[in-house]
Structure formats: structure tokens, C-alpha cells
Image (cartoon, helix red, strand yellow):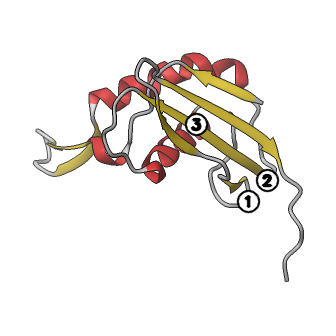
Amino acid sequence: MIIKIPIQCRSKKNSQQIFKNKKTGKYFITQSELYKEFEQECGLYLMKHKKHIDYPINLKCTFYVKDRRKRDIVNLLNAIQDILVKYDVIEDDNYNVVASVDGSRIIYEKDREETIIEIKRMEVQNEQ
């Protein structure tokens, strides 16, 4: 299965904000508006891919970016995995489902912002 999202991926980890609850006075961490918008827009492209995958897969993500800023691919992969779980494409993002992320990479292309997700079923051998 190949899913194309014509949006540049946003990192969940680097977009956190701290707010204070007005009623309790306690501080809490939430995602930035930029990440929340990205997550919501992804949902529009993922609604037709609700598969609730519960078997081992290789999740290959190709992140096309339009600038040469340094990015952490692990943070981008974490964001995509959480979004895939939220929109019921995969059941969970633990190692029993996302067994591998082989082939994932970030590619600089001046006029292209896109995230391409490839999901392939894996035959996992029993390890002892």
C-alpha cells in the first residue's frame, strides 16, 4: 500500500508547547498548532486507508523537503507512526506491527513538499 500526502511532515517532538491550566494552575505539554494542523490534514488522506493493520509490516517513509534544514528522521517517523495509529491505518506502532522502517529517508527537492508512506507486509521468522 502506498499513501501520498502532499504535505511536508512535521515533527511531533520539536513542536511541543507548555501551557498552564487556568483552573488547577498545573502546567501541561501539548503539541503546537502547526503540528495539530499537519495531523488533521493527514487525516484527510488517511481516511480511505483505514485497515487496522495488526500484522508485521515494513514502514518505509520518504520525506520530501524544500529546504536544507537539518531534521531528525526518527522524530518524523514517530510522528507518522502516531498519525497512522490515530487514523486506524495500523493497530499500534510497537515492534509487533512496525517491525521495520527500512528504506526511510529525507530527500531535499527545491519545489517539493510531500510525504510518501509505503506499507508492506513482512514475513517475520521466529527468533529464539
Residue closest to the eye, 14 or 51: 14
Point out residue 32 in the picture as x, y percentages from the top left corner. Answer: 27, 34
Q: Which mark is residue 62?
A: 3
For the N terminus, give its image quadrant: top right
Question: Judging from the image, what secondary structure is the residue with disc 2 in?
Answer: loop
Task: Give the side of residue 66 with respect to residue 3, left or right.
Answer: left
Which amino acid type is marked by label 1?
Asn
Which amino acid type is marked by label 2?
Pro
User: Which residue was labeled with disc 1?
Assistant: 96
User: Which residue was labeled with disc 2?
Assistant: 56
For the C terminus, give its image quadrant: bottom right
Q: Residue furthest bottom?
A: 128
Mark 1 crowdedness (10 Å alpha carbons): few <14, some 14-19, many ≥20: some
Q: Could you give the CA–CA distance between mark 1 and mark 3, rounded to whole angstroms?
A: 22 Å
Task: Give the side of residue 59 with respect to residue 25, left or right.
Answer: right
Residue 109 visible in rendering: yes
In the rendered structure, which disc, 1 or 3, sits on the residue that comes first in sequence? 3
Q: Could you give the CA–CA distance between mark 2 and mark 3, rounded to whole angstroms?
A: 20 Å
Residue at (37% x, 23% y) in the render: 37
Task: Tell me whether the residue at label 1 lies in contact with that at label 3, contact meaning CB atoms closer than 8 angstroms.
Answer: no
Task: Tell me whether the residue at label 2 lies in contact with that at label 1, contact meaning CB atoms closer than 8 angstroms.
Answer: yes
